[in-house]
Image (cartoon, grey):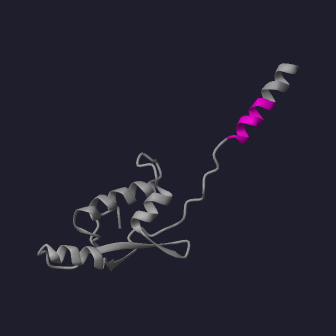
Amino acid sequence: MNRYWFIAMAGLALAGCGEKEEKFPAVDLRGRLVVDSAITEQRQAQGIQGEYYQRILTVNGADMTFNEFLSKYCPDPNTRNETCQKAFRIKKIDDVGGATKFLPVGLQ
């Protein structure tokens, strides 16, 4: 009888040790595009014409850059969270030539 009591108490203790997941916010990963003036000026100094955009997301009513969103909500690149997986795919596209409104099907 003592064994069963011990197993039950150990199970309850271990159940309380689990990490509490922060509720993942609902977010539109496309966000809105704004001109990143610092990088635009840097590229124009190199002779590259055009404007460089960055993606701004609205998360829980507050604006944050795409990179801030990734560092706060998706710190692990091997996550199974579908939103984070899409976000990492969008980041790869944006890193090439700046944020673009033309995203592949499935990331829109």
Indicate left or right for 78 with 10 as reference. left
Q: Position of residue 51 (x, y in %)?
A: 22, 79
Residue 27 lies in the magenta stretch: no
Horizontal arrangement in the rendering, residue 64 relative to residue 48 (left or right): right
Residue 104 seen: no
Q: Is residue 107 above or below residue 21?
A: below
* Residue 86 place in picture, x, y as percent: 38, 58
User: Residue 90: percent from the left, percent from the top?
Assistant: 33, 61
11 is within the stretch colored magenta: yes
Q: What residue do we see at 28% from left, 65% from top?
A: 94
Residue 3 position, x and y percent, is 83, 20
Residue at the limit of the structure toward the right, as seen here:
1
Residue bounds of the magenta highlight: 9-17
- Is residue 25 visible to us here? yes
Residue at image location 55% in from the left, 76% down from the top:
61
Q: Main secondary structure of the magenta part?
A: helix
The answer to which quarter of the image holds residue 50 is bottom left
Q: Is residue 56 above or below residue 80?
A: below
Q: Quadrant of the C terminus?
A: bottom left
**Can you say which quadrant of the picture contains the N terminus?**
top right
Q: Quadrant of residue 31?
A: bottom left
Residue drawn at (29%, 76%) of the image = 38
